[in-house]
Image: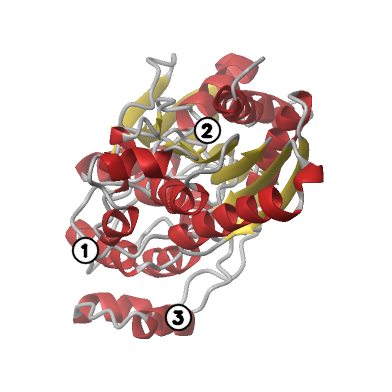
Amino acid sequence: MNTIREDAEIIIRKSIDAVMPENAVMAALSERRFKDGLRLVAIGKAAWRMAAAAKKALGDRIKSGVVITKYGHSKGEIEGLRIFEAGHPIPDRNTVEGTRAALDMVKNLDGGEVLFLVSGGGSALFEMPEDGVSLADIERATESLLVCGADIVEINTIRKRLSAVKGGKFALGCKPARVFSIVLSDVIGDRLDSIASGPACPDASTAEDALNIARKYDLNFPSNVMEKLRVETPKTLDNVETVITGSVSLLCGAASSAARELGYRAIVLDSGLNCEARDGGRFLGAMARDIHDFADFWKPCAVIVGGETVVKIKGGGKGGRNQEFALAAAEMIGGYDDTVVFSVGSDGTDGPTDAAGGIVDGDTKPRLLAKGVGISQVLDDNDSYNALKLADGLVFTGPTGTNVNDFAALLCR
């Protein structure tokens, strides 16, 4: 019989396998016919896998292509395609170089078609500053938004207005060519204008929304940035067809199925979680206490949530939102046997770390206390990575090649 931690590891692996992008791309292309001379642009953490699948399906009908993905996420050359690895979550010079190559490829097309493959991370990986804005301006704005705890929709609302490709501007630049877009969603609710900041989608956010976000978090952007926030983005596009494939709902469903196969009663409690990471972790931890104390009849059980939490950075430590989620849960479940909480990013990375997330059990808190480490102090310093490392609580998957938000689960038996 597996240990409960081994069960958690099986659920993590099977869930991520279920949302790999290759099958999704193949399915989206199976009933779509393209002319020869197709141009391909793929952006995001899953860009390489999506592009490789498209190349396998379409072969020589793809005349040329550009793939822009995060460092370490490329798996090698793809014939006929130029591959760029670039910075995430902060864009860098390679971001601009790859984006410029994509724009040069699609501009002045005399009709024709562009296959646009979009996945999470595209907001940082596909970027060309608007006139009057520098890459440094975008980097500083992104850093400010990340630090203050803005959610992904708020961050993208600002970035669209500083970018020459976001908020529908890329599709506008492809005209008169038509754009067929396959989107792997990493945004709660699958809002097209938010996924990768909507390069091929009319923008639902307004200049007023952007200014309100700046006021909400008291962000003192320079005057050239504030000027761009007042400019509206495209509200209509007539040259785009889009298919959404893959989402956090599918990820959570796969986790539920994997848990049931292992004998757990499984429930997906929420696939739209959007709160501070530590609050989410404490919530699952509190559920564990209630199940053990008042609902013993329900065990073995698995409670699954998905979405994208945020971290308000106040300390100087190292960690990511999934690690902070797991560590906060550890404080609540200390001393409880046969109890595990994990939280993992489907892309295999969590914040600026090499871990995908964290996994904790009833022994995590006592183990840390024995080493003189208090969880509350660690959370105050945002140092979840080093604490979980001490407690053998880091989850490592390596770059997975997909990205459909995060998922977490409580297992009790």
Tell me the residue that label 1 is attached to.
140
What is the distance, in whole Å, between disc 1 and disc 2 at their CAs? 27 Å
Mark 3 or 1: the one toward you: 1
Tell me the residue that label 3 is attached to.
207
What is the distance, in whole Å, between disc 3 and disc 1 at their CAs? 19 Å
Label 1 Cα crowd, 10 Å radius (few <14 / some 14-19 / many 20+): some
Tell me the residue that label 2 is attached to.
402
Q: Is residue 136 above or below residue 292?
A: below
Mark 2 or 3: the one toward you: 2
What is the distance, in whole Å, between disc 2 and disc 3 at their CAs? 32 Å
Residue 379, visible in the rendered structure: yes
Label 3 Cα crowd, 10 Å radius (few <14 / some 14-19 / many 20+): some
Residue drawn at 45 percent across, 80 percent down: 207
* Residue at disc 2, secondary structure: loop
Residue 320, numbered label: none
Q: Amino acid at mark 1?
A: Arg
Reading the chain from its start, which is encountered first: label 2 or label 3? 3
Q: Amino acid at mark 3?
A: Ala
